[in-house]
């Protein structure tokens, strides 16, 4: 087990060195550095669980599978999802720092509800409600382009593709 965690830490450090241009000060985090998209109503969600390889259903993360990655703490439902996250963190981190993708289309930062999400390839978009999700999903490519431009202006980060 210790070898597994040593390997995970090594992978995380390589990913961390390869990543540039992050501005976590604009992310939707609480005071402890936990992504608010995870920490809603006392529940902490596993970011991998939203994707097909994690089951496509939001799962509650557990403290025993917590991981601090580049100043943000993530919780996972199991060791497998934590390991999956470390293979490609940029894929599993929420787009637009965990803010509502529909709101970002107009340059606003609004909290989200994790049950409203869309996975599009390597990106996950979260929304405040079903109406925002329906709006965004009607033209994912066009809306994402507008939201990407606003997120770049707000955070300085390039879009994660």
Image (tube, grey):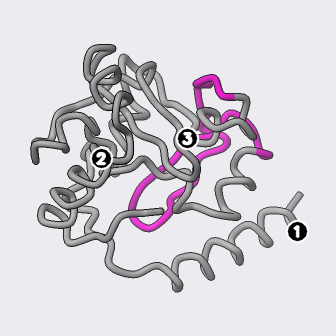
- Compared to 123, does 63 lie above or below? above
Eyeballing the image, is 27 above or below 59? below
Locate residue 90, reporting x and y percent.
Answer: 52, 62
Find residue 126 and report its image quarter. Answer: top left
Q: Is residue 141 left or right of residue 152?
A: right
- Residue at position x 23%, y 50% in the image: 147
Secondary structure, mark 3, is helix
Where does the magenta region start and end? 56-80
Q: Is residue 21 left or right of residue 87?
A: left
Residue to which mark 2 is pinned: 142
Q: Which residue is mark 3?
A: 47
Q: Secondary structure at mark 1?
A: helix
Is residue 63 found inside the magenta-colored segment of the image? Answer: yes
Please tell me whether mark 3 or mark 2 is closer to you in this view: 2
**Residue found at x 65% / y 54%:** 85
Q: Position of residue 109 (x, y in %)?
A: 15, 41
Checking the image for residue 3, the label placed there is 1
């Amino acid at each position: 087990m210790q070898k597994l965690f040593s390997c995970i830490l090594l992978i995380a450090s390589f990913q961390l060195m390869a990543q540039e241009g992050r501005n976590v000060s604009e992310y939707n985090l609480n005071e402890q550095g936990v992504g608010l998209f995870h920490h809603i109503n006392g529940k902490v969600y596993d970011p991998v669980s939203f994707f097909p390889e994690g089951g496509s259903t939001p799962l509650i993360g557990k403290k025993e599978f917590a991981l601090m990655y580049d100043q943000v703490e993530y919780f996972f439902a199991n060791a497998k999802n934590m390991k999956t996250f470390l293979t490609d963190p940029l894929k599993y981190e929420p787009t637009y720092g965990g803010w509502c993708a529909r709101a970002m289309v107009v340059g606003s930062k609004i909290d989200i509800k994790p049950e409203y999400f869309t996975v599009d390839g390597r990106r996950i978009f979260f929304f405040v409600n079903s109406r925002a999700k329906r709006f965004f999903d009607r033209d994912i490519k066009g809306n994402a382009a507008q939201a990407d431009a606003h997120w770049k202006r707000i955070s300085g980060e390039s879009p994660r593709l």
